[in-house]
Image: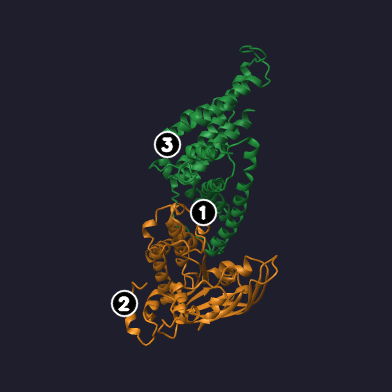
Chain colours: A orange, B green
Amino acid sequence: MAIVNLQNVTYQYPLTDSPALQNISLQVNEGEFVAVVGPNGAGKSTLCYTLAGFVPHFFKGQLTGTIEVAGIQSHQTSLPEWVLNVGLAFQNPFNQISGAKFTVFEELAFGLENIGVPRDEMKARVEEAMKLTGISDLADRSPYSLSGGQQQRVALTSILVMQPKVLVLDEPTSQMDPIGTREVFGVIREMAERGMTVILVEHKVEWIAQFADRVIALHDGQVLLEGKPGEVLTSDLLAEKGFGLSRYTSVARRAQELGLWTKDTLPVTLDEAVDGFSLTPDPSLRSASQSPTGRGES
Amino acid sequence: MQAIWPLLSFIIQFTMHDRLSFYYFRDSLLHRLNPLTKLALVFGLILVSFISPFYWTPHLLILAGIIPLAFVGKVTREYLNATFRIILPATGFLFIMQSLFQPFEGRELFRVWFLHPTVESTLFAFRNAARVFAMASSFTIFLLTTHPRELMTDLTRRGLPPQIAYVIISTLQILPQMQAKAQTIMAAQRSRGLDTQSSFLRRAGSLVPLVRPLVFGSLVEVEERAIAIEARGFTSTHTKTFLHEIPDTSVDKTIRWFLAALVIIALALRIWLS
């Protein structure tokens, strides 16, 4: 059952010459984890704003087509009602700190105060969300005293705590180290398992390949490809169009040309890459490529 | 140019702490009062000292009301600090200027060159200085003992538009951030060879590359912040709830009524005696 349904959506920002989104049709099922990839200017952030209702309620400009979430069309409702269903966290964590609050705990409660959640439930929800994203120890700190990665976790948590049906994330791990990124992807995956629908814009394709159910490749405001992560992220088309793909994919593609690649499909992650390499140019000798730890290949 | 930021940061660090708030956490009677009661106290004191027809009212209020209040609120040291550094010099200046230059006819106190303060102008200046002193002092004690969060939460609960509360609180929070950002931009421009040490004109010119990223950056920030708080239902039509409970006891209500009565009495006396 599709909870998100975009039909022929075309959108052009005011004072621009060409549309940022062109004829996008997209269905996302409840509890599905969809990743969106694309080069700069492909319309990824605009897609996020559109899903989250900021197009057309916040950004003016020309919009055609229909955007439907949980059976409601976005132009038929108001933004404050829309955000109850669709939560948005975006890239720059600093600008997502409300500035109205003095501690992280208060910052996380801000959204719940706005939508009138009773005090006891508010506290319980904030505590649960902090535990989930691993920021319980930051509760009494000032949101401005945190590092970029910590602020990003706070920004993500401040949306999670509102328990939207659909979670739209625009590069939520851009300021995080690999460990932080892995943890946050784990949290996002878990939210999807619990039935939250996730739409994630992300450059870190190796993590997408491990966690996402489906990948949508955007280019020039259009959907270029759509499908399973392993297929989309290794496609020749994306490589030609200048998408930032995994280095394991490019290494394996080169290996394939040299006859060092043993599989039919190309890898996105290190583990897959390790799996498929042959140390001799003859593809039939594939047993030699296994290393005991699954790592350590060079 | 170089002098501006260190000076600004000095003023901010010197007079404020904890992100542009004057607040000091103490466990005192005054801290436990409802913010509106304290606000009523401030305006009550100010109004009475300005309205009262009796000459010594502001002086009496300072000695018997405001200074004891600082003591009750356990902020005596901070209050005296502000008094000696800012309030006293300012009101002292006011006193001298008014006693010298208010054109009152009367008995001259002394005459030096063209300066000839009279008894009347001196008395007039002394009362005005006391009124301003009372006003500045009660606001200082209010700010020292009231967390802006509590004040804004309480006022929003009582019907102040949340947008106004937001503007006030976020200004307190974001100003130091903008200051830090300006310093970063400055350092970045300097590392690319911006001249900040030569003649005045050149240094004034070096402001230009600072202003553009700061202003345009801030505009982008405003848009993103608007999106961020909107994404969290800021303009939602639901009745807001509040994380912090701000107590409003019968003591608070009694104090507020008492203050209102005082102001009315002062007003009545003023009309009666004039």
Q: Which residue is mark 1?
A: A99
**Could you confirm whether marks 3 and 1 are on the same chain?**
no
Asked whether the residues under the numbered discs 2 and 3 touch, taking CB atoms below 8 Å apart as contact, a structural biologist would say no
* Category of crowding for the residue at label 3, using alpha-carbon neighbours closer than 10 angstroms: few (below 14), some (14–19), many (at least 20): many
Measured as percent of width and height from the top left, residue A293 is found at 30, 74
Apparent side of residue A226 relative to residue A178 in the rendered image (left or right): right
Q: Mark 2 against mark 1, which lies toward the viewer?
A: 2
Q: Nearer the viewer, residue A86 or A264?
A: A264
Tell me the subunit letter for badge 1.
Answer: A
Tell me the subunit letter for badge 2.
Answer: A
Measured as percent of width and height from the top left, residue A166 is found at 50, 73
Residue B200 numbered tag: none
Mark 3 belongs to which amino acid?
Val
Q: Quadrant of the C terminus of chain A?
A: bottom left
Q: Is residue B198 visible?
A: yes
Query: Tag 1's secondary structure?
Result: loop
Q: Which residue is mark 3?
A: B75
Mark 2 belongs to which amino acid?
Ser
Mark 1 belongs to which amino acid?
Gly
Tell me the subunit letter for badge 3.
Answer: B
- Residue occupying the point 56% across, 77% down: A240
Q: Nearer the viewer, residue A200 or B141?
A: A200
* Category of crowding for the residue at label 1, using alpha-carbon neighbours closer than 10 angstroms: few (below 14), some (14–19), many (at least 20): many
Q: CA distance from mark 2 to mark 1?
A: 51 Å
Q: CA distance from mark 3 to mark 1?
A: 27 Å
Asked if residue B163 is positioned above or below residue B82 in the image, the reply reads below
Q: Nearer the viewer, residue A211 or A161?
A: A211
Apparent side of residue A205 relative to residue B220 in the rendered image (left or right): left
Q: Mark 3 against mark 1, which lies toward the viewer?
A: 1
Asked if residue B44 is positioned above or below residue B98 in the image, the reply reads below
Q: Which residue is mark 2?
A: A291
